[in-house]
Image (cartoon, grey):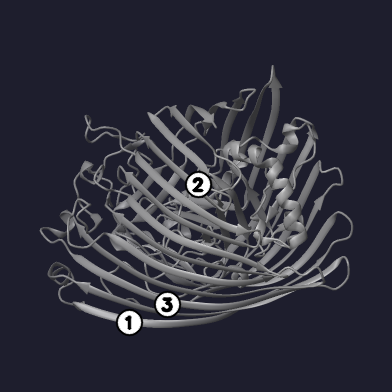
Amino acid sequence: MHPYALTIPAIHRQSPALRRLRHAVHAATLGAVALGVPGLAQAQGNPALEEVVVTAQRRAERIEDVPISLSAFDQSALNNLRIESTDQLQMGTPGIVNTSTAGDGISAIYIRGVGTGYSGPGLEGSVAVYLDDVYLQTQTSSYQATLDVAQVQVLKGPQGTLWGRNATGGAILIETRDPTLEEVEGYVKGGYGNLDWMRGEAVVNVPMGDTFALRLVGFYEERDGYVENIAVPNFEDSGVGAGETYAWRAKALWQPNEDLRLVGKLSHDRRNGNGAIHSLRYNGDGSPTGLGFYKTTQSPNREGGGGDDTESSMASLRLDWTFGDWTLTNTLAYRETRAYGCTDNDGVVDELLYFCTVSSKSPNPGGADGKEDNTLTDELRLTSNFDGPFNIVAGLFYEENEARFVGRIGGAFFGDLLPTFDNRDDLTAYSAYFDASWDITENLKLSGGLRYTYEDKDHSVVNDDDALALFGGTIPRRNNDSADFDNVSPRVVLSWSPGQTNFYASYAQGFKSGGFNSPSFTVDPVLDPEEIDAYEIGAKYRSEDGRLSLSGAAYFYDWTDMQVAFITGGGSGILQQNAAGAENYGAEFNVDWAPLDALVLRAGYAYSHARFTEFPQAAVYNLIDGALTATAEDLEDRQVPFAPDDTFTASATWFYGFGGWEGDATAAMRYSSSYDFTAGAGGELRASAQDDLTLVNLTANLRSPSGAYEFGLFVDNAGDEEYIQLVSTGNTGVYMTPAAPRTYGATVRFNF
């Protein structure tokens, strides 16, 4: 899909001629982009769909010219589709499934069935997330609020050459707005809705002379829960999503001339959750509990006490220097993440089993600081801007990560014992990459590149006396291991562009690093790296009048040593195991059409056939002697998790005006066929699965003639569908986290 408005990327990323052209367009459209109007073409009565420029190949290009299946969203598109954070991107493009785990602020995005539900400190996700050109190492606090963004790009398929390791599924590229030198501008916005939802946000851009500017962004949001704890009648509503979130971001721009830019950023976000909600659906003997969808009987001690509290802080500095036909970019960043809290892992009011991070900020205090990651990254990149047929991108990447996870389990299962572990994981990684493109003829282009990656991982475990007692002295107090991995990830693309259509064929390899399961009381065997060889053909078309844009792709993945999540014994945690292999083939099609000057229609369909080819020892829970018991099952030919066969998205946006007022209204929907949450849907009950699902979001906005005031209405999940955010099967039963019911609200915004 090519969403709603022209995206003007940073001027320094383009060739000199294109940079001058974009600079003029940027100056003309600055006010429209800053105020978030639905798009310059529509506002001026031009029926054409607006051009979208992306950086999927590390340089600014029209989306139709990029031989990658991808979607791009500017702020207006995100607002109209009700995408307020990256975990909601599935509403805007087919082939994506997202699940938010019950804690750590984790947004687990699956693209074409490739993703990671949860990776502890010794492992990483399968979809790389980049925030302002900075790779986010950990899945903790990985979902990002889409506030004051220039663009969000979703790249489908392995992106190992240009975007590095851990991009076997694809990449999410988030670019927030930089400060501008033109004028003071910004807005304040507030909203209120059901479940006592309240939100306030503010943005201000302040030029300070001709070469320096600041941009400050902040928001606060809170909401009540929607799950009733019937075991404690007077207890307040529980809640997935209940609690409060706040964040701020400060960016500074220094641009002494057109060829040199430095952008520094400081940011912080904090999420105070009300606890992870586990609604027990089946008992440990496999019998259904009969609980209502938004009911739970879990212990209230695990709510409101840091059940999913997370915070992260980041500092970064980006340098872009254009000299002649070259642009040199360096992005240096440091990020800290913390997670605190507890989860009830049995779903009943009597505490049989719970798990907590150990921290003074959680219900089980201790000297550790919960789950913590400290990450330093630096990337140096050189990009050519030649007018001739040959161009290159080359770069070096370095990363250090120190992670620690101190956890404790407790409950009636363990008597007076509170077994505690201390896991530490250190990572050093570096890579070098080179990618080149050659215009063989005016219409025929050959592109290709390589990335070499090396990384070293150290993992250690320390157990306390209670842990040793629990395991009867069969585990050591201290243990450690290390492993190193290297990889060469190639890509080759041939594209042919006769007229308005771009045809392409590509081969690419994705590499997800191996590593260690964590947290754990033991040092488990090293997981092998996951690799995907991907073959894709596709085409993109944009009509001469700009009213119609089409894109389609077909692909085949050969997937080896796939890393698959499973629930540990007792349901106390999530670990990974290697499946021998899987294959995935499918096709996608997207259409954007402006049949009328005031109407834009968009639709996308994705078919995916993702199946295990070998998985003889998949971890599942089957009924043995009347109880759910950890065992193994052969899942050959079974659908891989989070890989529905069919997904479909569609939206219609109507632009209207009267008496000088302008507005827009959008109806957006998403359909997904059924899919599993874990391999084999958890085992014999096949309960860890989502049925077919259709979601509808509605928005309407109205702007005053001066543009100073905006009024909005929204409805999320308009059909009030009951669907699952997370579900797990363990030997205590099957517990589920319900997603939000219908929510609605109104907003008011003042622009200046």
Q: CA distance from mark 1 to mark 2?
A: 45 Å
Left or right: where does residue 336 sit relative to residue 67?
left
Of callouts 1 and 2, the N-terminal one:
2
Mark 2 falls on what kind of element?
strand
Is residue 707 shown above or below 27?
above
Is residue 547 shown above or below 71?
above
Of callouts 2 and 3, the N-terminal one:
2
Is residue 189 shown above or below 705?
below
Is residue 223 shown above or below 565?
above
Using the image, tell me which numbered label, if any, was put on residue 428: 3
Instruction: Tell me which corner region of the image, top left, top right, bottom left or bottom right, holds residue 652.
Output: top right
Q: Are marks 1 and 2 in contact (CB under 8 Å)?
A: no
Q: Which residue is mark 1?
A: 481
Q: Which residue is mark 2?
A: 215
Which residue lies at the image location 87% right of the left edge and 65% below the top edge? Answer: 443
Q: Closer to the camera, 291 or 693?
A: 693
What x and y, as percent, mark residue 740?
Answer: 44, 37
Left or right: where does residue 629 sit relative to residue 212?
left
Answer whether residue 530 is visible to the viewer in this image: yes
Disc 3 marks a residue whose amino acid type is Thr
Outermost residue on the front side: it is: 209
Q: CA distance from mark 2 to mark 3?
A: 33 Å
Instruction: Tell me which corner region of the image, top left, top right, bottom left or bottom right, holds residue 408.
Output: bottom left
Using the image, tell me which numbered label, if any, was put on residue 52: none
Q: Are marks 1 and 3 in contact (CB under 8 Å)?
A: no
Disc 1 marks a residue whose amino acid type is Asp
Q: Closer to the camera, 490 or 135?
A: 135
Q: CA distance from mark 1 to mark 3?
A: 15 Å
Mark 3 falls on what kind of element?
strand
